[in-house]
Image (tube, coloured by chain):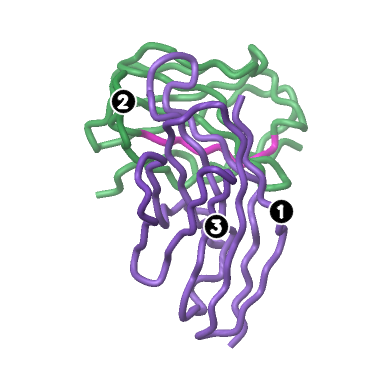
Chain colours: A green, B purple
Amino acid sequence: DTAVSQTPKYLVTQMGNDKSIKCEQNLGHDTMYWYKQDSKKFLKIMFSYNNKELIINETVPNRFSPKSPDKAHLNLHINSLELGDSAVYFCASTRDSGGAGSETQYFGPGTRLLVL
Amino acid sequence: AQTVTQSQPEMSVQEAETVTLSCTYDTSESDYYLFWYKQPPSRQMILVIRQEAYKQQNATENRFSVNFQKAAKSFSLKISDSQLGDAAMYFCAYRSYYAGGTSYGKLTFGQGTILTVHP
């Protein structure tokens, strides 16, 4: 019954590899986000999708490619992983659909990525 | 662009006492939302409380309340009757009122404050 789920929860990999993180929400929300939490716990937006359309891309290296196959899913694929990509990646969703709203963002449990 | 500042990297409180976490923000917008999120060691982000900028009344949720000072751009969180389960990292976050455009509802976070609760 998890509202926003992410897989995997932990990911350990070597530099240069390609990996994907998956996110699914069963809340019927229109908008989904990826946030990165670095080693100092700072949280920063990476991407936002609304109804499968990319809305926000916050100066993220193009090694990161989000994909939204449908409204309930937002995946993050990372090519050629670097040491600096080690972080916790959070998926979030909200019911906003383009208009003014006060919808709260619901977060997934996070995926801890460690690049060796 | 909006910025959010939490000037207290760490705070501590005795169980059953009251503690206040500070947050200031900078924006040119007049309508927006402010949030406090809690991140316990489990790392799950949990919404604690939400404030709409157009509402003068301060939000409250059980033991949690805010002091929202719009002119001063200040949004502090007060935790009353602190419990051991309140120990966590607390993040203040800002969101534009209008979900469209390039901000599209994104949250801008402060640096976080680690709260320790002593028994």
Label disc, if present, on residue B76 of the rendered structure? 3
In the figure, A6 relative to B60: above or below? above
Mark 1 Cα-neighbour bin, 10 Å: few <14, some 14–19, many ≥20:
some
Left or right of A30 on screen, residue B106: right
Label disc, if present, on residue A100 of the rendered structure? 2
Nearer to us in this view, B34 or A83: B34
Three-letter amino acid code at the position of disc 1: Ser
Mark 2 Cα-neighbour bin, 10 Å: few <14, some 14–19, many ≥20:
some
Nearer to us in this view, B93 or B85: B93
Q: Disc count in the image?
A: 3
Find residue A83 and report its horizontal and vertical position in percent. Answer: 77, 32
Find residue B70 and report its horizontal and vertical position in percent. Answer: 50, 44
Q: Residue at x 52, y 50 (%)?
A: B69
Nearer to us in this view, B71 or A43: B71
Q: Quadrant of residue B21?
A: bottom right
In the figure, A55 relative to B37: above or below? above
Q: Chain of mark 2?
A: A
